[in-house]
Image (tube, rainbow, N blue to C red):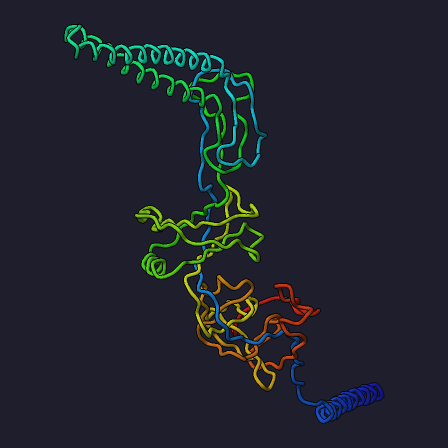
């Protein structure tokens, strides 16, 4: 029994010794590790794409959506009854003023004209005979061979025939006008639409439309702007010609250029806007009636404004903001205010009204990795050959846009 107790005590002492040795060893390793481990490394520079804020003169633009409409639209209708015997054009053809479009059977009208002409010639012959009789009877009455009553009777017959001749001349003229209606001519220069009455159909005077012609040179674009701009638009419209640009979606980089020609005489109470109209030469027929277009009304030119690529401006909890690259290549978060009205005339750019100066560098891409004060590494500049053609191409690894410090 005594030997057994002694053995247990020895075993307990060995375990305690091993435990103390392990604790001491861990303390030594921790001390050595604390001596050999360096401090926390500084964050690596974030790769970004940069651009320089520019100072330039830009147009002051009001953007709107407009609708293209023909300068003139004419419905062609017959002015006489008859059968359409010939169509002289093709659908969609360009026609000039005076070109013949349709021919209505002219034979009944030609017959009526011949009849009126024959009556006129007969009455003219009778009038010439009456004039000769009147001269002869005038000599006889002066010689007292015939009575005054007989001479006055001849004068009355002559006056009646002269009136009848004038009436016949009017009848002939009316018949000629009616005959001219057999050839339906274009009243304007324009483009024809679909043929609504084909060859062989019977038409009535002033009944259904036979054709619609629309004048597209020049052409008009109608659009509306908020009534708050009415005073400014009217003042500048009176002072000078206001340029208007119009382009269908996808062609904003190459718009057609025209001029403002009309301001409506009342504000639309339902929408709170005023209707405007611009005229375009449209020589190349790039604008088409009924088409919706993006419109820019140029009110003037603003000098020395600061612009940056639109990708540089990001939303944040403090509103719009940019990251400015300081001289020590660290990022500075800076709230800014933009002017959307001026920026409408600069595709791909934004006008910064306050918060930024010309010549400062801003981050265009790579915002996701940035925080205020973090070092940056500029791996490209907006405007390089690789980032040209209206957009900004980000180097590999630069993605995303988030705004502002939390």
Res 228 visible: no
Q: Which residue is drawn at the image coordinates 49% and 62% (left, top)?
A: 345
Q: Which residue is drawn at the image coordinates 53% and 33% (left, top)?
A: 192
Vertical side of 219 occupied by 103: above or below: above
The number of numbered discs placed on residues in the rendered structure image is: 0
Q: Position of residue 379 (x, y in %)?
A: 68, 76
Residue at the outermost front position: 143
In-front residue for pair 374/353? 353
Q: Which residue is drawn at the image coordinates 50% and 73% (left, top)?
A: 56
Determine which quarter of the picture holds residue 325. Answer: bottom right
Determine which quarter of the picture holds residue 337. Answer: bottom left
Vertical side of 278 occupied by 396: above or below: below
Q: Where is residue 223 in the image (x, y as percent from the top left)?
A: 42, 49
Q: Is residue 384 found left or right of 29 in the rendered image?
A: left
In-front residue for pair 277/385? 277
Q: Position of residue 171 (x, y in %)?
A: 35, 17
Q: Is residue 207 found left or right of 21 in the rendered image?
A: left
Vertical side of 87 occupied by 111: above or below: above
Q: Where is residue 254 in the image (x, y as percent from the top left)?
A: 57, 56
Res 246 visible: yes
Q: Is residue 148 found left or right of 343 in the rendered image?
A: left
Vertical side of 69 occupied by 336: above or below: below
Determine which quarter of the picture holds residue 237. Answer: bottom left
Quadrant in which the N terminus is drawn? bottom right
Residue at the outermost right position: 3
In-front residue for pair 83/382? 83
């Amino acid at each position: 029994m005594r030997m057994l107790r002694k053995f247990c005590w020895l075993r307990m002492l060995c375990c305690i010794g091993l435990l103390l040795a392990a604790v001491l060893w861990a303390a030594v390793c921790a001390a050595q590790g604390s001596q050999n481990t360096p401090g926390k490394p500084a964050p690596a520079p974030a790769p970004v794409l940069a651009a320089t804020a520019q100072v330039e003169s830009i147009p002051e633009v009001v953007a709107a959506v407009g609708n293209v409409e023909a300068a003139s639209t004419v419905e062609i209708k017959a002015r006489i009854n008859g059968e359409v015997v010939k169509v002289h054009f093709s659908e969609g053809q360009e026609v000039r003023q005076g070109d013949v479009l349709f021919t209505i059977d002219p034979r009944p009208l030609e017959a009526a004209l011949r009849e009126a002409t024959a009556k006129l010639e007969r009455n003219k012959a009778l009038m010439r005979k009456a004039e000769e009789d009147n001269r002869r009877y005038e000599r006889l009455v002066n010689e007292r061979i015939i009575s005054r009553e007989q001479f006055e009777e001849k004068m009355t017959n002559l006056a009646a025939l002269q009136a009848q001749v004038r009436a016949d001349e009017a009848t002939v003229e009316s018949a000629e006008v009616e005959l001219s209606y057999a050839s339906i001519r274009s009243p304007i220069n324009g483009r024809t639409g679909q043929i609504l009455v084909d060859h062989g159909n019977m038409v009535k005077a002033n009944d259904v439309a036979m054709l619609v012609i629309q004048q597209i040179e020049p052409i008009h674009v109608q659009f509306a702007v908020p009534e708050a701009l009415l005073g400014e638009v009217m003042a500048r419209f009176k002072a000078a010609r206001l340029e208007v640009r119009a382009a269908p979606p996808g062609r904003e980089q190459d718009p057609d250029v025209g001029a403002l020609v009309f301001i409506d005489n009342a504000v639309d109470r339902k929408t709170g806007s005023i209707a405007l109209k611009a005229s375009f030469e449209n020589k190349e027929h790039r604008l088409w009636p009924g088409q919706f277009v993006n419109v820019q009304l140029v009110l003037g030119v603003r000098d020395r404004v600061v612009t940056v690529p639109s990708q540089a401006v990001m939303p944040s909890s403090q509103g719009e903001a940019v990251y400015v690259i300081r001289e020590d290549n660290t990022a500075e978060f800076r709230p800014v205010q933009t002017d959307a009205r001026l920026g409408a005339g600069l595709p791909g750019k934004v006008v910064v009204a306050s918060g930024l100066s010309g010549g400062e560098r801003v981050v265009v891409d790579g915002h996701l990795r940035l925080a205020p004060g973090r070092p940056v590494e500029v791996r490209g500049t907006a405007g390089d050959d690789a980032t040209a053609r209206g957009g900004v191409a980000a180097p590999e690894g630069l993605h995303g846009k988030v705004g502002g410090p939390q």
